[in-house]
């Protein structure tokens, strides 16, 4: 699953007991927004035994490197956590400089700090129109509902994560949440985790 403060309070222990294994929690947006639920949710998810990660909502009208610095300042990913995620799904103008150069700077800063390729969350229509195949080698988290299998955007041969619904109802959540599936087994999922080495 993935959550933000919009999902209201959740019972993390109940979520884990329901069969969920991992969660991505919204941390930051642009250069100066911190989700008010992030710190508590991030801590509680780990205590409940969920694999956890944090995600950033990328704003195309903000500087890419500054957005990365804001995420790094607020998200202390530890060994055993999932890699950082960047959610890019819309163009908001005016675009700060060249879109692809700015996004590349964002990715480079995150990956240098956390030591893992960032996961890119996007939709196939947006990516194929605005971004295309400029950023190979990163895991794909594709959002697409109402289909039996997701459409893989240009630049990838397969998907790593698929957000298949925004109306998942599960014990522990007061309201419907986003549901996701990992394309692989438990060992493959754990291979993505941040290594137990000093950064």
Image: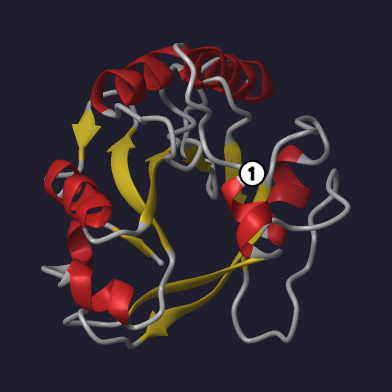
Quadrant assignment, res 117: top right
Between residues 141 and 153, which one lies in front from this camera angle? 141
**Residue occupying image coordinates x 52% and y 14%:** 109
**Residue occupying image coordinates x 34% and y 26%:** 71
Instruction: Provide residue 37's location: percent of width, then percent of height.
Output: 14, 50
Instruction: Provide residue 169's location: percent of width, then percent of height.
Output: 33, 88
| SS of the residue under disc 1 | loop
> Is 126 on the left-hand or right-hand side of 25?
right
**Residue occupying image coordinates x 39% and y 22%:** 67
Quadrant assignment, res 108: top right
Between residues 37 and 196, which one lies in front from this camera angle? 196
Between residues 110 and 67, which one lies in front from this camera angle? 110
Display coloring: secondary structure
User: Is 92 rendered above or below residue 48?
Assistant: above
User: How many numbered marks appear?
Assistant: 1
Is there any visible trace of residue 142 in the rendered image?
no
Is there any visible trace of residue 160 in the rendered image?
yes
> Is 5 on the left-hand or right-hand side of 169?
left
- Find the residue positioned furthest to the right: 157
Q: Name the residue under label 1.
A: 191
User: Is 113 rendered above or below residue 150?
Assistant: above
**Residue occupying image coordinates x 20% and y 80%:** 172
> Is 67 on the left-hand or right-hand side of 187?
left
User: Is 126 rendered above or below residue 106?
Assistant: below
């Amino acid at each position: 699953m993935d959550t933000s403060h919009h999902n209201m309070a959740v019972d993390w222990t109940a979520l884990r007991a329901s069969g969920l294994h991992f969660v991505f929690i919204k941390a930051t947006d642009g250069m100066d927004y911190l989700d008010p639920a992030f710190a508590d949710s991030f801590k509680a998810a780990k205590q409940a035994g969920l694999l956890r990660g944090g995600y950033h909502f990328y704003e195309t009208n903000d500087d890419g490197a500054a957005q990365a610095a804001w995420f790094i300042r607020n998200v202390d990913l530890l060994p055993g956590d999932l890699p950082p995620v960047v959610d890019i799904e819309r163009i908001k103008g005016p675009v700060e400089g060249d879109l692809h150069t700015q996004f590349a700077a964002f990715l480079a800063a995150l990956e240098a700090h956390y030591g893992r390729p960032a996961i890119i969350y996007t939709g196939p229509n947006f990516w194929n129109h605005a971004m295309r195949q400029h950023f190979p080698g990163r895991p794909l988290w594709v959002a697409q509902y109402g289909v039996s299998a997701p459409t893989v955007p240009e630049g990838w041969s397969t998907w790593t994560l698929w957000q298949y619904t925004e109306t998942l109802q599960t014990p522990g959540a007061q309201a419907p949440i986003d549901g996701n599936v990992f394309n692989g087994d438990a060992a493959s999922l754990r291979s993505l985790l941040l290594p137990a080495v000093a950064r």
